[in-house]
Amino acid sequence: MQKICLILFGLLILSSAQSQKENKETIIAFGSCGQEAKPQPALAMAASWKPDFFVFLGDNVYGDTYNMDTLKMKYQKLANQSSFQKLKSSTKLIATWDDHDYGWNDIGRHYAKKEASKTIFLNFWEEPKESPRWSREGIYTSYYHKVDSKIIQFIVLDTRTFRDDLIPYPDSIPIKRPFFYQLDYLPHTSKDSTLLGEEQWKWLEQELKEPADIRIVCTSTQFGAAYNGYEAWANFPHEQERMVQLIQKTKASGVLFISGDVHYGEISKRVYPGLYPLYDVTSSGITSTWMFATPNQYRIEGPIMDNHIARLRIQWSKDPLIIMEIVDIHQNVRVEYTIPLSELNFKN
């Protein structure tokens, strides 16, 4: 009888340990578009979750300047925010930039102060001096996080330093459905125009060859949204296609995009032949809002027009679950969309 009890007790311990392992969860919160002079309760809310990481996806301040003292002052305003301080003390921060904290609205590689802006950016986000971000052009980088035997890879893109100018939408071209607003830009048709630049593309190919189970591609502008006449990857359709082909070429499983910029939240899903679905979770509106959401045939959740933070909750079961959520500043989960990690694998 005593032997039976010991066996049963041992089974209970094993069952409990297995249950704890399966209940393990990694939380990755992210957002963009925060006016440094406005209160930011969204960041305090994110801090209360105690996420494993928080990713700032750009427009982290609204510099919009060629004066570097002005840019430094605006970063200092963000640093002085108690909500930012709470977040910084509660988790590891990852950051990229978009146009307003890089330099100027919708600007790309021709911004004259990009090197000075980069130095201010790296100093503010306390990038270690040994980081390759200091020695190469641009701020793209990667980070790795291991959970038991699983690897999360953060691929942090720079969509500003190398990006060619956008093509203004001519007044002579009439606006057609489904658009109900004035369009700003036309898509590039020339394949020698670029969004990421050759050096970053080469780096990205090597990163996609690295072993990882989940690859979170952090891009300041939307990858998955349809062309809407505003700034997005859709203005460089050949670059979008290059990304798809590169994922196929490298057989990189587990790719999931997170993005910002548009002042609302949504989830887009793109399906391409010979590739698993590509999801893009957009979180944009730490303080900023917009009047409307643009048409997006790939939108599967949202739009959320209120200030919010998004998060990925990764539950480490045998087939891990990725729970995509958008949470408004009143702690209401406005979007919840769950996929198994196995969905982000090549089938052959």
Image (tube, rainbow, N blue to C red):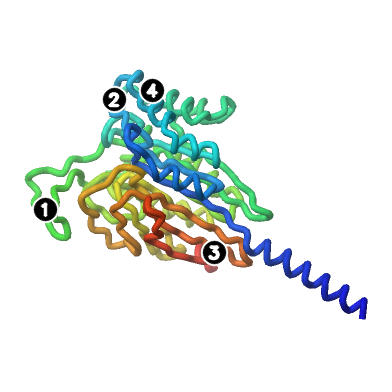
Alpha-carbon span between mark 4 and mark 3: 40 Å
Q: Answer yes or no: do the residues labelled 4 and 3 have beta carbons within 8 Å?
A: no
Of residues 194 and 217, the one nearer the viewer is 217
Q: Is residue 331 visible?
A: yes
For the residue marked with disc 4, what is the amino acid? Lys
Quickly name the residue at label 4.
Answer: 72
Q: Answer yes or no: do the residues labelled 2 and 4 have beta carbons within 8 Å?
A: no
Residue 175 disc label? 1
Query: For the residues carrying marks 1 and 4, which lies nearer the camera in this image?
Result: 4
The C terminus sits in image quarter: bottom right
For the residue marked with disc 2, what is the amino acid? Thr
Query: For the residues carrying marks 2 and 1, which lies nearer the camera in this image?
Result: 2
Quickly name the residue at label 3.
Answer: 321
For the residue marked with disc 3, what is the amino acid? Leu
Quickly name the residue at label 2.
Answer: 65
What percent of the width, then of the height, locates residue 203? 50, 40
Secondary structure of the residue carrying numbered label 4: helix
Of residues 194 and 56, the one nearer the viewer is 56
Residue with the most extreme bottom position: 1
What percent of the width, then of the height, locates residue 174? 8, 51
Quarter-of-image position of residue 196: top left
Q: Is residue 280 visible?
A: no
Alpha-carbon span between mark 2 and mark 1: 32 Å
Looking at the image, is mark 2 or mark 1 earlier in the sequence? 2
Of residues 204 and 86, the one nearer the viewer is 86
Looking at the image, is mark 3 or mark 1 earlier in the sequence? 1
Secondary structure of the residue carrying numbered label 3: strand
For the residue marked with disc 1, what is the amino acid? Ile
